[in-house]
Image (cartoon, rainbow, N blue to C red):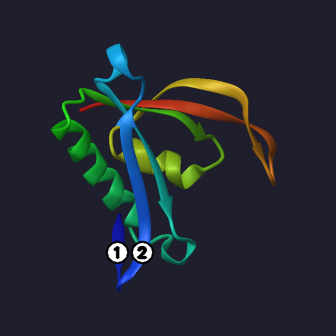
């Protein structure tokens, strides 16, 4: 979790992308409190979670659904070394854009 100014700014979870034979590839989920958007919380959690995944013995991290129109998140993951390895048509029902594609993003650790 990320604490800023004594308040919960964000939280993340690292887990196996697939249990068993796929457990060497990590997956993660992140949430940043709206009051802390644009303050580097996501990047800090991303960097830390990559380090933790490696300590846990993972060889890579994969995100199975990164909404294509979430431009800031896509840029952040690319900045941290992730590549887009696939695109899922209509994977997300966006309130503004309607049915929106999502990326599968991957990075070796």
Q: Are marks 2 and 1 in contact (CB under 8 Å)?
A: yes
Cα distance between the residues tagged 2 and 1: 5 Å
Packing grade of label 1 (10 A; few <14, some 14-19, many >=20) is few
Residue 39, numbered circle: none
**Circle 2 residue:** 8
For image coordinates 35% across by 18% down, the residue present is 20
Q: Quadrant of residue 18?
A: top left
Packing grade of label 2 (10 A; few <14, some 14-19, many >=20) is few
Q: Which residue occupies the extreme bottom position in the image?
A: 5
Q: Secondary structure at mark 1?
A: strand
Residue 84, image x, y percentages:
48, 29
Work out whether residue 91 or residue 76 is closer to the camera in this orientation and state it.
91
Residue 58, image x, y percentages:
24, 30
Q: Is residue 71 left or right of residue 14?
A: right
For image coordinates 51% across by 51% down, the residue present is 73
For image coordinates 81% across by 54% down, the residue present is 96
If you read the primary sequence from the N terminus, does the residue marked by circle 2 or circle 1 appear first?
A: 1
Residue 107, image x, y percentages:
34, 31
Dividing the image into 4 quarters, which one contains the N terminus?
bottom left
Q: Secondary structure at mark 2?
A: strand
Work out whether residue 64 or residue 14 is closer to the camera in this orientation and state it.
14
Dividing the image into 4 quarters, which one contains the C terminus?
top left
Residue 71, image x, y percentages:
58, 50
Q: Is residue 95 above or below residue 32?
A: above
Q: Is residue 23 above or below residue 97?
A: above
For image coordinates 39% across by 23% down, the residue present is 19
**Circle 1 residue:** 3
Q: Is residue 54 above or below residue 89?
A: below
Q: Which residue occupies the extreme top position in the image?
A: 21
Work out whether residue 83 or residue 47 is closer to the camera in this orientation and state it.
47
């Amino acid at each position: 979790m990320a604490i800023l100014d004594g308040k919960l700014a964000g939280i993340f979870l690292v887990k196996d992308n697939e249990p068993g034979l796929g457990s060497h590839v990590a997956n993660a989920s992140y949430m940043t409190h709206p009051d802390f958007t644009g303050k580097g919380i996501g990047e800090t959690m991303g960097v830390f979670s990559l380090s933790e995944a490696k300590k846990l013995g993972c060889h890579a991290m994969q995100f199975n659904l990164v909404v294509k129109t979430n431009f800031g998140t896509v840029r952040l993951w690319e900045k941290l070394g992730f590549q887009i390895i696939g695109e899922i048509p209509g994977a997300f029902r966006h309130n503004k854009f309607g049915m929106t594609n999502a990326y599968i993003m991957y990075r070796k650790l």
